[in-house]
Amino acid sequence: MPLYLFDKRFMEACPALGQDFQVPSVFTEDLMAVMGAQRPDF
């Protein structure tokens, strides 16, 4: 079952979960990064 996280700071709140999290290779390029600080959490 996929895990959907909409909190951009989830790795700070739960470091153990962050260690287990990996971005799938097909999603390595973050196209929303061009929005900078205006990027929504979803």
Image (cartoon, rainbow, N blue to C red):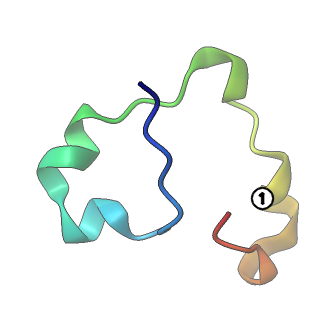
The image quarter containing residue 15 is: bottom left
Query: In the rendered image of this protein, does residue 31 appear above or below residue 13?
Result: above
The C terminus lies in quadrant: bottom right
- Which residue lies at the image location 56% right of the left edge and 21% below the top edge? 24
Residue type highlighted by circle 1: Ala
Residue 13: quarter of image: bottom left
The total of numbered circles placed on residues is: 1
Residue 6 in the image, given as x and y percentages of width and height: 53, 63
Q: Is residue 11 above or below residue 23?
A: below
User: Which of the image's four quarters has the N terminus?
Assistant: top left
Q: Percent position (x, y) of residue 34?
A: 87, 62
Q: Secondary structure at mark 1?
A: helix
Residue 13 is left or right of residue 4, and the answer is left
- Going 61% across and 16% down the picture, which residue do you hit? 25
Residue 42 vs 17, above or below: the answer is below
Mark 1 neighbour class, 10 Å CA radius: few under 14, some 14 to 19, many 20 or more:
few
Seen at 22% across and 39% down, the residue is: 19
Relative to 30, 22 lies left or right: left
Relative to residue 18, is residue 41 depicted above or below?
A: below
The spot of residue 37 in percent (x, y) is: 72, 82
**Residue 21 drawn at (x, y percent):** 34, 36
Looking at this view, name the residue that lies furthest to the front. Answer: 1
Q: Which residue is mark 1?
A: 33
Residue found at the very far left of the displayed protein: 16
Q: Is residue 4 left or right of residue 13?
A: right
Q: Please give the name of the residue rendered at 76% of the width and 73% of the height, measured from the top-left corner.
A: 39
